Amino acid sequence: MAAHATLPFSCSSTLYGTRVAICEMPFATIASDELGGLGGTCVLRGCVPKKLLVYASKYSHEFEESRGFGWTYETDPKHDWNTLIANKNTELQRLVGIYRNILNNAGVTLIEGRGKIVDPHTVSVNGKLYSAKHILVGVGGRPSMPDIPGIEHVIDSDAALDLPSKPEKIAIVGGGYIALEFAGIFDGLKSEVHVFIRQKKVLRGFDEEVRDFVAEQMSLRGITFHTEQSPQAITKSNDGLLSLKTNKGTFGGFSHVMFATGRRPNTKNLGLEEVGVEMDKNGAIAVDEYSRTSVDSIWAVGDVTNRVNLTPVALMEGGAFAKTVFGNEPTKPDYRAIPSAVFSQPPIGQVGLTEEQAIEEYGDVDVFVANFRPLKATLSGLPDRVLMKILVCATSNKVVGVHMCGDDAPEIIQGIAIAVKAGSTRQDFDATIGIHPTSAEEFVTMRSATRKIRKKSADQVESKDEVVSKQ
């Protein structure tokens, strides 16, 4: 029962001589109880289409930057939303075709339709029964909506990727990565964007310094943040415009209201409870350290288990499952030093612990921070800045966390993640030659700690150096 995580596993499992079948619903850009498609959320209505829209939206900022480099335009560039969406959908259909060919070439059987588990070894699809020694559930998640008046007027992230027209003015409710990514997309495409969050800050669970920095940078680009706002209702006026009522008042004139307030495991009506698979109150499947459920023959990976909800993590879990079950090589998923990104504008990349987590785990932590104006901004004249941060365990000198917010942060952090995963020390970073002129070189040229946290001795020592700041 498939999402993106199960596709590579299916092919690799055949290498062990295993007969594999995948059950997946027919293709659609917006998922429903009967529609889905090979690739699941990430490929069809998540990572891939979202990143394509991020690319589209970045051009407006680049047009602004270009003026400082001598570029002029006789007319302002115009964007055609319909062209973008049509090209995006063509690419998604191409990817689905590629996945079909990969599965076919690997000898994997594709069963199209909605599956339901009827006993520990049997799945029903379109009234036909299929038996297997093992069943792997990898159905992912879907957007979660609150039960408030007027919710029928709201779009979710699925719909936001396939709108018939670009929003003129949009309210985005939510402070997580999905909300920030869509805020950047629509702002870049010249929509008026308002973000409503329940808390004081965006991106709960991220490094505090990064949270503050990205919100400030996005505000400078024209996005309006409304903090400590709890949505209560949505109303639609006679002219078709929407109003959002919160605990602090009513905000109106929106062409669209989008909720990005979380996701839930897609486990409804799969027959899991009937066969004895244990789930939590939110529908996430409970699994052991090898991804086995409470029913020995049924396994689960990816967002449906609500462990670490990232596509590469789900792929890793699927690979570990194949080794454990078919390769006679018991393998636990490794959740240490997982890199991740937020494709906000500016984007975020991170690996390892936040400053708050590092202090809690190690007590004594050296914090290296650089907050500077990148070279490109010196001519563009725009207020763009970059934040880079390294967290070091003071006793072992091992780098335990790295964070960046600025252009190319996800690309840079992917390389840094190798060093963190390998257990590199601060001296290893210092001994590495930088590439000049780049923002990335700051990771190997920050010589003095910005602050030294000494929690074990109840002291916090600030180094003489302030945050590295380039003009």
Image: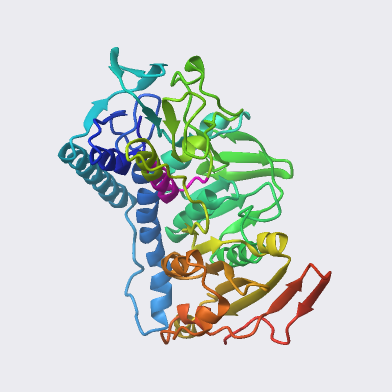
Question: Which quarter of the image is occupied by the N terminus?
Answer: top left
Q: Is residue 13 above or below residue 274?
A: below
Observer-nearest residue: 116 or 34?
A: 116
Q: Is residue 311 toward the left or the right of residue 145 in the image? A: left
Report if residue 312 lies within the magenta region: yes
**Outermost residue, left direction?**
105
Residue 136 can be seen in this image? yes
Q: Is residue 220 toward the left or the right of residue 452 in the image? A: left
Which residue sits at x=32%, y=74%?
74
Question: How many callouts does the rendering have?
Answer: 0
Q: Which residues are magenta?
A: 308-318
Q: Is residue 75 toward the left or the right of residue 439 in the image? A: left
**Outermost residue, top direction?**
127
Q: Name the spot of residue 175 as percent of width and height, x first.
A: 60, 50
Which residue sits at x=60%, y=35%?
234
Q: Is residue 275 above or below residue 159?
A: above
Q: Is residue 443 toward the left or the right of residue 458 in the image? A: left
Secondary structure mainly formed by the magenta segment: helix
Q: Name the spot of residue 187 as percent of width and height, x first.
A: 48, 58
Q: Name the spot of residue 217 as percent of width and height, x first.
A: 57, 67
Observer-nearest residue: 327 or 416?
A: 327
Question: Which quarter of the image is occupied by the C terminus?
Answer: bottom right
Report if residue 85 lies within the magenta region: no
Observer-nearest residue: 167 or 341?
A: 341
Which picture quadrant has residue 286? top right
